[in-house]
């Protein structure tokens, strides 16, 4: 409750509200002290009608939302408690920059018989004309805020395209200013050790919860001094900043749209800051996380090697492992593992049938088929023939993308030239045209990056490996599979096998395998004990898929 200082009987209790955002604090005309003095002068102008009793000030806070302004919340509470008779502000934009919020606040004032006075606009909200003016001014304030936000976004995007980081505090780095005055990142050696430890644990296949638990047991803290959570660990493992890249604009309007605001054309470029994590380790961790994400938890747990890979021969759905116990003739019990159709187990016989197969039989058939095919002489030549058959269609698709990008590039360049000419002819239009021209330049920069990516993909498609390279790679797979234990074998299978189908009666299996850069990097990491030919290009093999 507000206590008035020597308030006369007829004097209204007047309070002031001031707000400055971070950007405006540098401008002395918007300071809290300057606004407060104007409000006190306005009270004195009313003489004995108004008695100033308190000033509410939200410093360094945007006018976008009411909820994030504690002093505004306190003002509304005092208004509703009957402790205020009049509210004075320097400008209605100090109250809110959103039309809905402003009208909501003024409506609370009116319901509690509180006068609202804006010094700059000199309006009275008790009259229809005053309320109309309020709505018009509020709309202009909201437009100004949106325009400022868009300009800030465009400026930050342009900075990101040039490789400069826009994020705030980041574990592993310190924010510094380089010799040219650019805000950049410098590695913090102590925090970088934590980052490397997190990636080392992830590369070993540990999950987010296990990593967070180990970090907390070691006493490590986040940049803000908090304990690690699974969310914090995931944010680090998925942040390309640590591999020397800058990502910006992946999500827009997070406060309203959350993940629905994801942008397809976000910036991802090489950064101006040093990397903490090597590209090879980054690729391996990203690949492992993708595998864990695309497969349900029950495919990652347990020692059933083919869970999530073996497909039902009837409906094509996944086969899940189950155990049964049989009583033998001598009275002993024997536990038997089966793979059976998950759709049948979950939805019943109207959807599919069990199509069960003994787990030991299926796992033996798959391993024997893999080793048999991968040990074939000149297997690399057969795979390359299959790659040639599918290469032409992929090349045509990428070339169509290139033509489309070239047309878009020409259109953007023409528009930019037209804007430049218009600005040269009429200097008064520069302020209105420049934001749009900068937006087009940002689009052009992103288009150049996309064009380079497509060219890189096209070069990879046109690049066929030598048969000897593939022979070395597949020989490596054989060496890894042969002595592997069940847990390791399961991880290897899930790395490069897409699916397995079978015929139970004929005891036949068909295996579809796929190799790309991530898979090859995983095999390389797991094969440190395996010596390959020094001249082999086994780890430069383009992505390919084949079934046998």
Image (tube, grey):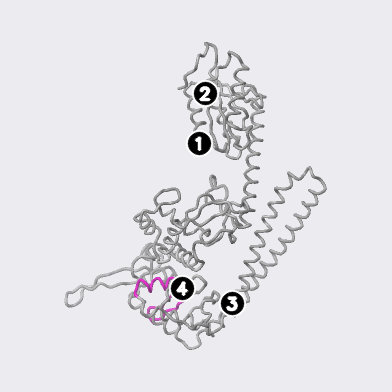
Where is residue 300, by image quadrant?
A: bottom left
Dot 2 or dot 4: first in sequence order is 2
Work out how far the residue at label 2 is from the one at label 3, CA to CA, in angstroms: 76 Å
Toward the front, the furthest residue is 179
- The residue furthest bottom is 377
Mark 1 closeness class: few <14, some 14–19, many ≥20 residues within 10 Å: few
Looking at the image, the residue that sits furthest to the left is 330
Q: Earlier in the sequence, mark 1 or mark 2?
A: 2
Which label's residue is closer to the chain start, 4 or 3? 3
Provide the secondary structure element on which disc 3 rests: helix
| Residue matched to label 2 | 54
> Which residue position holds label 1?
67
Tell me the residue at 55%/37% (across/down): 60
Query: Residue beneath label 3, please?
Result: 390
- Residue extent of the magenta highlight: 485-511
Q: Secondary structure at mark 1?
A: loop
Residue 385 image position (x, y, % from top left): 57, 83
CA distance separating discs 2 and 4: 70 Å
């Amino acid at each position: 409750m507000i206590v008035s200082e020597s308030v006369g009987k007829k004097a209204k209790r007047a309070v002031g509200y001031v707000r400055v955002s971070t950007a405006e604090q540098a401008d002395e005309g918007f300071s809290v002290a300057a606004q407060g003095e104007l409000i006190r002068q306005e009270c004195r102008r009313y003489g004995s009608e108004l008695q100033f009793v308190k000033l509410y000030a939200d410093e360094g806070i945007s006018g976008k939302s009411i909820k994030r302004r504690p002093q505004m919340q306190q003002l509304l509470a005092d208004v509703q408690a009957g402790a205020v008779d009049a509210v004075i502000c320097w400008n209605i934009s100090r109250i809110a920059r959103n039309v809905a919020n402003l009208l909501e606040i003024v409506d609370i004032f009116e319901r509690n018989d509180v006068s609202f006075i804006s010094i700059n606009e000199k309006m009275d909200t008790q009259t229809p004309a005053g309320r109309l003016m309020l709505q018009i001014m509020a709309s202009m304030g909201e437009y100004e805020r949106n325009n400022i936000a868009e300009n800030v976004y465009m400026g930050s995007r342009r900075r990101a395209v040039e490789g400069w980081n826009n994020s705030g505090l980041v574990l592993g780095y310190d924010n510094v200013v380089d010799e040219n005055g650019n805000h950049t990142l410098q590695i913090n050696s102590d925090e970088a050790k934590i980052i490397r430890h997190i990636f080392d644990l992830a590369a070993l296949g540990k999950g987010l919860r296990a990593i967070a638990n180990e970090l907390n047991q070691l006493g490590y803290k986040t940049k803000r001094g908090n304990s690690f959570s699974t969310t914090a660990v995931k944010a680090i493992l998925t942040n390309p900043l640590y591999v020397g890249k800058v990502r910006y604009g992946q999500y827009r309007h997070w406060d309203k749209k959350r993940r629905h605001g994801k942008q397809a054309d976000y910036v991802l470029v090489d950064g101006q800051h040093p990397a903490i994590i090597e590209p090879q380790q980054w690729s391996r961790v990203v690949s492992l996380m993708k595998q864990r994400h695309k497969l349900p938890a029950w495919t990652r747990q347990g020692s059933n090697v083919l869970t999530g890979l073996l497909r039902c021969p009837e409906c094509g759905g996944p086969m899940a492992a189950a155990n049964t116990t049989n009583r033998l003739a001598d009275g002993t019990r024997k536990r038997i593992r089966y793979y059976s159709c998950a759709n049948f187990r979950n939805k019943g016989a109207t959807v599919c049938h069990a199509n069960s197969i003994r787990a030991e039989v299926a796992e033996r058939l798959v391993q024997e088929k893999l080793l048999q095919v991968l040990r074939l002489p000149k297997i690399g030549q057969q795979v390359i023939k299959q790659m040639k058959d599918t290469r032409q269609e992929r090349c045509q698709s990428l070339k169509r993308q290139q033509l489309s990008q070239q047309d878009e590039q020409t259109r953007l360049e023409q528009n930019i030239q037209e804007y430049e000419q218009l600005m040269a002819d009429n200097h008064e239009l520069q302020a209105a045209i420049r934001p749009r021209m900068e937006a087009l330049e940002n689009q052009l920069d992103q288009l150049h990056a996309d064009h380079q990516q497509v060219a890189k993909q096209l070069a990879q498609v046109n690049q066929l490996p030598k048969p000897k390279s593939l022979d070395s790679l597949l020989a490596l797979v054989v060496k890894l599979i042969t002595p592997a234990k069940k847990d390791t074998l399961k991880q290897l299978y899930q790395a490069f096998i897409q699916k397995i189908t079978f015929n139970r009666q004929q005891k036949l299996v068909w295996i579809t395998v796929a190799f790309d850069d991530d898979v090859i990097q995983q095999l390389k990491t797991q094969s440190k004990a395996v010596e390959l030919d020094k001249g082999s290009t086994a780890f430069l093999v383009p992505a390919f898929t084949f079934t046998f």
